[in-house]
Amino acid sequence: MRAAALLACALLGAAGALPYRVQPGDTWWSLARRSGVSVAALQALNGGGGLLRAGATVQLPGTGLNTAGSAVAQIPARPASAQSTPAPAAVFQRGQAVYYGGRRDSRTVMTAAHLTLPFGTWVRVTHARTGRTVDVLINDRGPFGNSARIIDLSDEAAAALGILSEGVAPVTLTVLRRP
């Protein structure tokens, strides 16, 4: 696995890595997907990854030129979503996510339980290691019994985040919209 990451890093370096300024809402996963590389390769190109912060500069594979003629990373714009959501706020909470059967809701299957957030709050859950994200609706209370666990995800949300095989995963929560 490490050899594959080093090979990908070497190939990306040969193709010309260019600086990119991180925008609010960017994740390793979204940048890798839009750049056409794996998260591991993108993180290897940037010294192992870590938490992305808006305004920070990372290296992306690319060969485009901006209008002034200087090299910049060219990545496609984010696709328009059916629901327009405002730019996410700062990280609300960090901890561990677990999953359970979930409480059904007529609006979405992407639901979650949180101890204090009001019902009807939309939260973006970001996997700290992979950068994958999922937006969930808070419609239940929990998790109980372990203070490190900050959110219980429905089975569908856990599958979208890729944590079914892990059971417990490190995450960050960002409040998208309160009721």
Image (tube, rainbow, N blue to C red):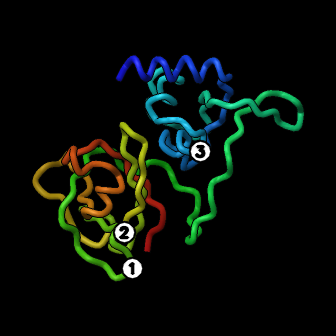
Q: Which mark is residue 32?
A: none
Residue 62 picture location, percent across and down:
68, 31
Residue at the farthest left position: 145
Q: Kindly identify the residue that appears in the image at 56 percent across and 65 percent down.
A: 85
Residue 8 picture location, percent across and down:
50, 23
Report the mark closest to the observer, 3 or 2.
Answer: 3
Q: Is residue 30 above or below residue 139?
A: above
Q: Which residue position holds label 3?
A: 34
Residue at the farthest bottom position: 106
Residue 126 visible from this viewpoint: yes
Front position in the image: 153 or 78: 78
Q: Is residue 150 above or below residue 55?
A: below
Question: Crowdedness of circle 3 by 10 Å Cα count: few (<14), some, many (20+)?
Answer: some
Residue 116 visible from this viewpoint: no
- Where on the picture, by quarter, is residue 114? bottom left
Report the mark closest to the observer, 1 or 2.
Answer: 1
Say whether marks 1 and 2 touch (CB < 8 Å).
yes
Quadrant the C terminus occupies: bottom left
Decide which of tag 3 and tag 2 comes sooner along the chain: 3
Q: Which residue position holds label 2?
A: 137
Front position in the image: 146 or 125: 125
Quadrant the N terminus occupies: top left
Residue 147 picture location, percent across and down:
18, 48
Q: Which residue position holds label 1?
A: 107
Q: Kindly identify the residue that appears in the image at 18 percent across and 62 percent down.
A: 100
Front position in the image: 160 or 52: 160
Q: Amino acid at mark 1?
A: Arg
State the CA–CA distance, disc 1 to disc 2. Answer: 9 Å
Front position in the image: 156 or 143: 156
State the CA–CA distance, disc 3 to disc 2. Answer: 26 Å
Looking at the rendered structure, the secondary structure element under dot 1 is loop
